[in-house]
Image: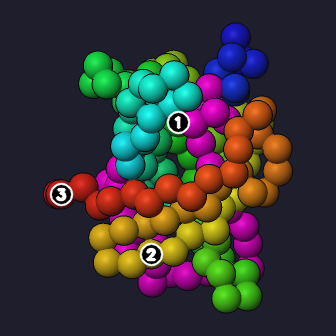
Amino acid sequence: MKQVIRALVLAAFFACCTLSVRSDDLSKLEGKWSVKKTNNEGQTYTQVLEIQKAKFKFKLVGADNQTHLYAEGDIKLSKLGPFSAIKFFNIKGGASADQLEPVDDDREAIYMLEDNRWTLATNFDKAHDGQRPAADTYARENK
């Protein structure tokens, strides 16, 4: 079961790095962000990422409007030369918020924050169970 949960979290998730913290970005990132995607089978889904202080909550919501994957944990922002990075760690994941198990895999991503758009370059840090590198642009949800 842990392998299945880990694979689901890894299949739907992303990551980050360390150096000098970007606290101004942390306050700009607080809130709810989402991106609509289509999988290889043509099914649509939405990834929702909520940032509050140095914590995150992630949901993968299907076209049926049901949460199919939930993860939460900690984040740390940093600067890598000219790049901004985010690290997702202490991750717990499962089918819902009440069915969480630890996921033994940190994630690191490079990001760009502009207005109400947050672009994450993910899965470049290491192999994640067949996930390909990608860049997704999340839009801030209305409060």
Up-down relation of residue 104 to residue 68 (above or below):
below
Picture coordinates of residue 87 (x, y %)?
Answer: 66, 60
Q: Residue at x 24, y 55 (%)?
A: 141
Q: Residue at x 37, y 38 (%)?
A: 46
Q: Which numbered disc, 2 or 1, marks the residue that appears first in the sequence?
A: 1
Up-down relation of residue 115 to residue 88 (above or below):
below
The image's mark for residue 71 is 1
Q: Nearer the viewer, residue 43 or 79?
A: 43
Q: Which residue is mark 2?
A: 113
Q: Residues within 10 Å of mark 1 (few under 14, many from 20)?
A: many
Query: Which amino acid type corresponds to the residue marked 1 in the rendered image?
Result: Ala
Q: Which numbered disc, 3 or 2, marks the residue that appears first in the sequence?
A: 2
Q: Nearer the viewer, residue 60 or 21?
A: 60
Membership of 19 in magenta stretch: yes
Contact (CB < 8 A) between labels 3 and 2? no
Query: Which amino acid type corresponds to the residue marked 3 in the rendered image?
Result: Asn
Q: Residue at x 50, y 56 (%)?
A: 136
Q: Nearer the viewer, residue 62 or 33?
A: 62
As drawn, is 48 to the left or to the right of 107?
Answer: left
Identify the secondary structure beneath mark 1.
strand
Quadrant of the image occupied by residue 101: top right
The image's mark for residue 142 is 3
As drawn, is 78 to the left or to the right of 53?
Answer: right
Residue extending farthest to the top is: 1
Task: Report the span colored magenta.
Answer: 8-34
Q: Is residue 100 visible?
A: no
Quadrant of the image occupied by residue 12: top right
